Amino acid sequence: MDIRSASSEFLCSLVKRLIASQFPDWAGLPIRPVERQGNDNWTFRLGEHMSVRLPSADRYVSQVRKEHEWLPRLAAQLPLQIPVPLALGEPGEGYPWSWSIYRWLDGDIASTESVADLPEFATSLGWFLVNLQRADPKGGPLAGQHSFFRGAPLDVYDLETRQAIEMLGDRIDGDRANQVWNAALAADTDAEPVWFHGDVATTNLLTSNGRLSGVIDFGCSGVGDPACDLAIAWTFFAAESRKAFRATVPQDVNAWARGRGWAIWKAVIVLAQQLARSGNIGTTTIWTQNPVTGRSVIDEVIGDYHEWY
């Protein structure tokens, strides 16, 4: 089943049946889809204080039990709210995979409109990541397929990245994009593996009264190289906010080089996909609710790279 092809009405009915059959105490609560849906899961409000998440395809199912096992352990070690699993659902009612019920976290999706002070927000996010990296990694899930290789060496995406840059041709500065990518691949690390989030995007950052209040969606999390979490330095931050973020997260120059690699990988593959679909890359957005195009992310990464090299 590819749940992304199902209608909203069908999915609400499915969630209602799953709740009724497996968690009858909550069967009377209203169910409605959330406004902004992700790719990995379909999310619903369950009453006022809970949410339901259904993996949208088989490749996302392993994330369900990972979050149920590890988020309660991480929550006590982190300075901001993160999702709290309340119940683990099993396959049923024609739905073939495990699914989750969480405590609902209030907040607005981070954007230039919802954030009052961007450098302060960058510092808060940096401090959250510092604490995440300090969390006890013993027994944690090592980066791999479950994290879509976030936290793993970048070379797993080498061919894909080079093909995307070549496909984009003169629509971007391909020579400099390759320079950034080559520098990222050459930036080795001998640091011990630590916890990483794996998808630090504005869609997964919550704000309250203009300040960072929570971090959600740990489906790509694991234990490995945290450089993947640095990509937001170029996909959302710039100038003073990027400086604030960099000053807060104590990573060496090699980690920042790998972070640029993660940012440019995402930008070029999304642009290449858009080009293949429509022949146009002008308005494709990357990892953000703001009007930041993949081309502008590439320009930011290249400009920052040449400040350091």
Image (spheres, rainbow, N blue to C red):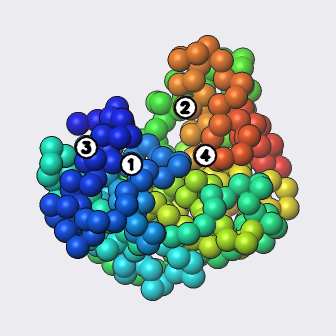
Classify mark 3: helix, strand or loop. Answer: helix
- Real-space Cα distance between discs 1 and 4? 18 Å
> Picture quarter containing residue 142?
bottom left
- Real-space Cα distance between discs 2 and 3? 22 Å
Label 1 crowd (10 A; few <14 / some 14-19 / many >=20): some
At horizontal 85% and vertical 56% (from top left) the residue drawn is 239
Query: Is there CB contact under 8 Å for labels 3 and 1?
Result: no
Q: Amino acid at mark 4?
A: Trp
Q: Amino acid at mark 1?
A: Trp
Label 2 crowd (10 A; few <14 / some 14-19 / many >=20): many
96 vs 158: above or below: below
Q: Residue tagged by mark 4?
A: 287
Label 3 crowd (10 A; few <14 / some 14-19 / many >=20): some
- Real-space Cα distance between discs 1 and 2? 23 Å
> Picture quarter containing residue 279?
top right
Q: Amino acid at mark 3?
A: Asp
Residue 41 at x, y = what percent? Answer: 38, 49
Front residue of 93/191: it is 93
Q: Earlier in the sequence, mark 1 or mark 2?
A: 1
Instruction: Give the foreground label among 2 and 3.
Output: 3
